[in-house]
Image (spheres, rainbow, N blue to C red):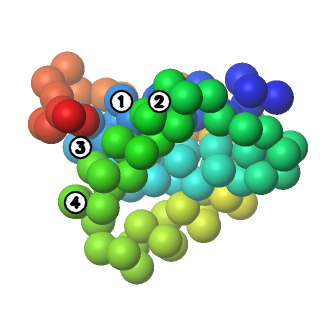
Amino acid sequence: HRDLHSFPTRRSSDLALRGECVVAAQLAGYADSVVQRVGSVREFTEQTTLDRLRQVLDSRLSPEECRSLLADGAAFTHEAAIDLALNTPISTRPVDHMG
């Protein structure tokens, strides 16, 4: 079950750092929904990544936009989330760092 949410969390972090905050928030919403659905607990490194991701999203998106995008992602199927994660191009230059 961990792989169902670990990859989207890592990918959303990479995307947020390169300015793709909409997709990053959607993938984070999907990963959160998987954790809740399967009753999983995030490992320390994944939770740290998620905490830093949320800092980036909070700095770039309004609270309303972030909530809406997280909710959108929570409704994704596994296939839709993985397709989005794999097919969203990432800029080669980071626009921010996570601390």
Q: What is the number of the mark on residue 14?
A: 1
Amino acid at the residue labelled 1: Asp
Q: What is the number of the mark on residue 19?
A: 3
The kind of secondary structure element at disc 3 is loop
Q: Is residue 78 left or right of residue 64?
A: right
Amino acid at the residue labelled 2: Arg
What is the distance, in whole Å, between disc 4 and disc 1 at their CAs?
A: 16 Å
Q: Is residue 19 above or below residue 86?
A: below
The answer to which of marks 1 and 3 sits earlier in the sequence is: 1
State yes or no: discs 1 and 2 in contact (Cβ < 8 Å).
yes
The residue located at (22%, 60%) in the rendering is 59
The kind of secondary structure element at disc 1 is helix
Is residue 26 visible from the viewing direction of this image?
yes
The answer to which of marks 4 and 3 sits earlier in the sequence is: 3
Foreground: disc 4 or disc 1:
4
Residue 80: x, y in percent?
68, 42
Residue located beneath label 4 in the image: 59
The answer to which of marks 3 and 2 sits earlier in the sequence is: 2
